[in-house]
Image (cartoon, rainbow, N blue to C red):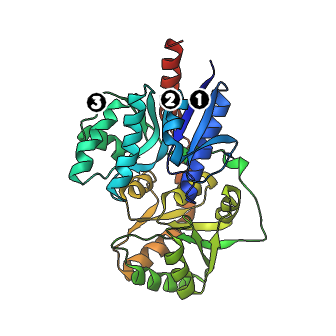
């Protein structure tokens, strides 16, 4: 039974997390469903990416028609905090797929927030989806509050948690950084407070700090500003392998972005999360010994928490190892099995 599946997400826009989501899902499909051919809805006009054929976003409709099913592949695209237009675009894909008779599944999806009047009306389109796995408890609760009842719903984890990390792990003992920091733009982020705290944290512990740009477009300005004011190294990734090499070089990772934190857990590197979004809080809460800071924290609180987390690195690392033993892999990927079963019935 040879089938084609269109993978939908925020792919091809130089955001490391989304590229890793895609790689993880492609690896799972190839290892478990050799008769499924993935097609990737991608933001760059390439013939292929990570070994899969590309459907340019401007040819969305032809990609849906060509495919036998559509799979939303993780991330936080079902929300209107970024823009209502983005939410309408992705919900429109579900509607188009339904109209053309193509079943839709969602794997490791994040949901919310949806605050606008239009968004709250349109969110009921999710009832057209056949099967969903969510990546965190908050997303599960969002579906409950929104009255989404028809799809099969599973509680899973973020797709990046299942990345074959040994495929990307590069040991390079010649480069070691004490602390690697990833920041991003966010409303209410008290940048000066964090800058002051980073200065004192570095001096008190005699640390080497470096800054890592996770999303090349959205994070470059603020990261360059932090690195300049702190006179620190700033690091950009060229491809997922180079990103892993950079992240692997750190003894401790501080991040606003979710996926450097998830990669930290895979690499067993202690971390601290800076909470700008509920998805970051949800992930950090899975680690009882991990520490977090709110973006509205003052400099003394930031400094104290950084110092505490730095001293507790080994305890945080022990919690990371326990977490990895309790991942819900089957629940996360159940929608793909559901879709495959549906296709089998239609033969």
Q: Nearer the viewer, residue 101 or 246?
A: 101
Disc 2 marks which residue? 69
Real-space Cα distance between discs 2 and 3?
21 Å
Dot in front, 3 or 1: 1
Decide if residue 318 is in sight here: no
Q: Residues within 10 Å of mark 1 (few under 14, many from 20)?
A: some
Residue 302, by quadrant, is bottom left
Q: Is residue 4 above or below residue 194?
A: above
Disc 1 marks which residue? 4
Q: Quadrant of the N terminus?
A: top right
Q: Nearer the viewer, residue 211 or 38?
A: 38
Q: Is residue 158 left or right of residue 279?
A: right
Residue at x 39%, y 57% (from the top left corner):
281
Q: Could you say whether the residue bearing mark 1 is in a helix, strand or loop?
A: strand
Of labels 3 and 1, earlier in sequence is: 1
Q: Residues within 10 Å of mark 2 (few under 14, many from 20)?
A: many
Disc 3 marks which residue? 149
Q: Nearer the viewer, residue 337 or 122?
A: 122
């Amino acid at each position: 039974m040879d089938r084609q599946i269109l993978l939908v997400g925020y792919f091809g826009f130089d955001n490391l997390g989304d590229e890793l989501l895609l790689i993880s899902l492609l690896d799972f499909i190839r290892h478990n469903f050799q008769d499924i051919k993935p097609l990737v809805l991608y933001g760059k006009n390439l013939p292929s990416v990570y070994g899969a054929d590309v459907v340019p976003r401007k040819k969305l409709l032809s990609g849906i028609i060509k495919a036998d099913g559509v799979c939303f592949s993780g991330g936080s695209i079902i929300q209107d905090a970024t823009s209502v237009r983005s939410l309408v675009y992705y919900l429109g894909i579900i509607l188009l797929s339904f109209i053309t008779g193509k079943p839709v599944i969602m794997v490791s999806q994040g949901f919310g927030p949806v605050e606008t009047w239009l968004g709250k009306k349109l969110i009921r389109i999710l009832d057209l989806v056949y099967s969903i796995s969510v990546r965190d408890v908050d997303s599960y609760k969002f579906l409950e509050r929104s009255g989404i009842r028809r799809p099969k719903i599973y509680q899973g984890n973020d797709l990046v948690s299942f990345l074959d990390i040994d495929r990307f792990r590069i040991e390079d003992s010649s480069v070691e950084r004490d602390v690697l920091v990833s920041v991003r733009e966010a409303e209410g982020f008290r940048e000066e407070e964090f800058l002051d705290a980073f200065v004192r944290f570095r001096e008190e512990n005699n640390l080497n700090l470096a800054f890592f740009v996770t999303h090349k477009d959205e994070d470059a300005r603020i990261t360059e500003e932090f690195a300049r004011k702190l006179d620190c190294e700033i690091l950009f990734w060229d491809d997922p392998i180079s990103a892993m090499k950079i992240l692997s070089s750190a003894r401790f990772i501080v991040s606003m972005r979710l996926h450097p934190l998830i990669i930290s857990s895979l690499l067993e590197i202690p971390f601290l999360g800076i909470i700008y979004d509920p998805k970051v809080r949800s992930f950090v809460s899975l680690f009882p010994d991990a520490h977090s800071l709110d973006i509205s924290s003052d400099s003394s609180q930031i400094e104290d928490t950084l110092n505490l987390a730095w001293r507790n690195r080994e305890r945080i690392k022990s919690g990371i190892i326990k977490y990895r033993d309790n991942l819900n892999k089957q629940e996360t990927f159940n929608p793909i099995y559901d879709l495959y079963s549906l296709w089998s019935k239609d033969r």
